[in-house]
Amino acid sequence: MIHRKTEQEIELMRESNQIVSDVHRLLAPMVKPGIRVSELDAMAEDFIRANGARPAFKGYQSGSPSIPDFPATLCVSIDDEVVHGIPTERMLEEGQIVSIDVGTEKNGFFGDGAMTLAVGRIDPEKQRLLKVTKEALYRGIDQAVPGGKLHDISAAIQQYVEDNGFAVVRDLVGHGIGRKLHEDPPVPNFGRAGSGPALEAGMTLAIEPMVNYGSFKVRIASNGWTVFTRDGAPSAHFEHTVHISKDGPETLTNHFERENG
């Protein structure tokens, strides 16, 4: 069931998603060679809790009794890690790309957003992968309007990514968000325009293209969480939580990007 939010509920979501954006603002300048991923995670948790929220990913259950609860505040995914990388004592290295996915819960409502950053200087093809993935996200967001169809978003993302020679991950999708971190509907990054559920004012979606440099195929690590590209090529991930208002899409997590272009 797709839950449409009231204006009061949207206001609460703005607060939770503002914290997501603020965590990105806090961490972006810290992403450089030599920093440990665990340091980024600790900074994020301290900031979220200091702002009266809780980390939404920490303790998240996969639904499988054989997989431990997610142990960290952030998902930090490096190079060929697509999503759900678990922060460790690993140091970032020059030339890597790193995705930082942040989830928060405050006043009973969730926020969710991700960005992929360069660690120092990266090669031009990795830079192009980041640029295309970010632009694909915004092309999808542009389709999040009342009267449209859900797969208008999906098709816009897929077409732009594939026109640029990259691949969208098929096994993982975006999602509705609100009182739960993951609500209906699933938001795939591939599909046929004009199909899927109708888009209505009051819907809130986490739109999140995951784009691989090579094949769209992925594999899951033995820890049960981290998703890798199957061919070992790099992957990028950008995500915003979007409110479909009667006037069009309102992006709730992009304050940091607005400031930095």
Image: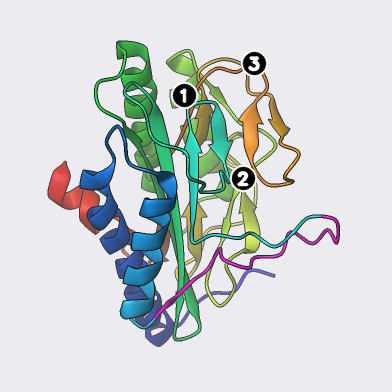
Q: Which of 221/88 is in front? A: 88
**Picture quadrant of residue 134:** top left
The secondary element bearing badge 2 is classed as loop
Quadrant in which the C terminus appears: top left
* Residue segment shown in magenta: 53-66
Report whether residue 3 is seen. Answer: yes
Image position, residue 258 (x, y; %):
18, 51
Residue denoted by label 1: 161
Picture coordinates of residue 8, whole percent (x, y): 38, 87
Q: Which residue is mark 3?
A: 231
Q: Using a 10 Å C-alpha cutoff, classify the residue at mark 2 as few (fewer than 14 neighbours), some (14 to 19) or many (20 or more).
A: some
Which residue is located at x 68 percent, y 21 percent? 230
CB under 8 Å between discs 2 and 1: no
> Which residue shows up at 41% across the image and 79% down it?
53
Whole-angstrom CA distance, mark 2 to mark 1, is 15 Å
Residue named by callout 2: 173
